[in-house]
Amino acid sequence: MRLIKEHSLQKLEYLKKYIKGYLTATKRLQAKYYIDAFAGTGKCLLHNTKQQVDGSSLIALKTEGFFNKYILIEKNENNFKILKECIKNEILEDKLSLIEFYNENCNEFLKKYNYNPSPYVGYFVLLDPAGPELEWETINVLSKLKKIDLLILYPYDMSLVRLVTKYPWKLDKFYGGNEWLDIYKKRRNAANARNNLLKFYIHNLEGLGFESKFIDCRPIRRKLREGKLLYYLIFVTHNPVAKKIISYIFDKELDGQETLKFN
């Protein structure tokens, strides 16, 4: 079972609330698909309390309503076995038939998958790697879909010095080229490099055709609203309604405000 820390609960809470809003707002679509690119083990173990919590795949499957298909991808073979067993034990038969499991590298899988390009078919894709495993070309392929919502976990606190010196090719794949290196070399300090690389990443999302007004992001800190900045959750879409949903959740939901109505 995967160990997680308190900050991961923020991501999972945002995810839960967005899926609920998405399923409500997309009832008129002919079909909708949920893709979890780093599906993990299903259940997670909270580091400090050892409490079991639902991971992203279980959250999606347990949310009221249905996607037409749940595509769960996990590269690690042991995690994949645990994931399948966990979901078979937790999920009722009516949804089990909608799940497709893939023990593959998500980048290779998502680049070759046979998508339905129809504007009446929606895809919500969760891309939440622990580090720079997500390749830019994967996002490029997904950006071509007309009804696509991406929730990306951007590893703001990744070990830049180690990656630059030992694994620069990983950053080339992550950023889609080596332009990131010029930004890194011009840094005033580590924080400046991280901030400028984040801006560079978001700017490149705009270059894929995602309008800036349909991009939103929120920081994930070690503790809610305080502590070290670890990640950014970046949401991108071509759909103004989807942007409205996520912005409301980012701005209000974790503060316990009233729920937005989608009528």
Image: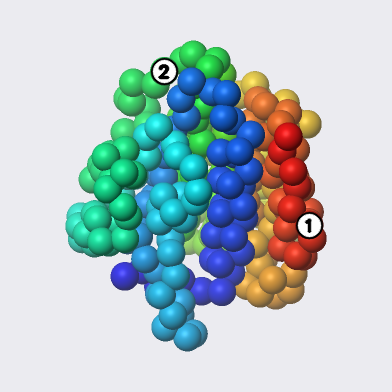
Residue 111, x across and y down, in percent: 37, 27
Closest to the observer, 147 or 203: 147
Q: Say which amino acid is labelled 1.
A: Glu
**Residue 89 location, quadrant:** bottom left
The residue that disc 2 covers is 116
Image quarter where the N terminus lies is bottom left
Closest to the observer, 104 or 229: 104
* Residue 232 visible in the shown view: yes
Closest to the observer, 119 or 112: 119
Number of the label disc, if any, that sits on residue 105: none
Query: Label 1 neighbourhood size at 10 Å, few (<14), some (14-19), many (20+)?
Result: few
Residue 104, x across and y down, in percent: 26, 42
Q: Do the residues labelled 2 and 1 touch (CB within 8 Å)?
A: no
For label 1, the SS is loop
Give the number of marks. 2
**130 to the left or right of 186:** left
At x 41%, y 75%, the residue is: 52
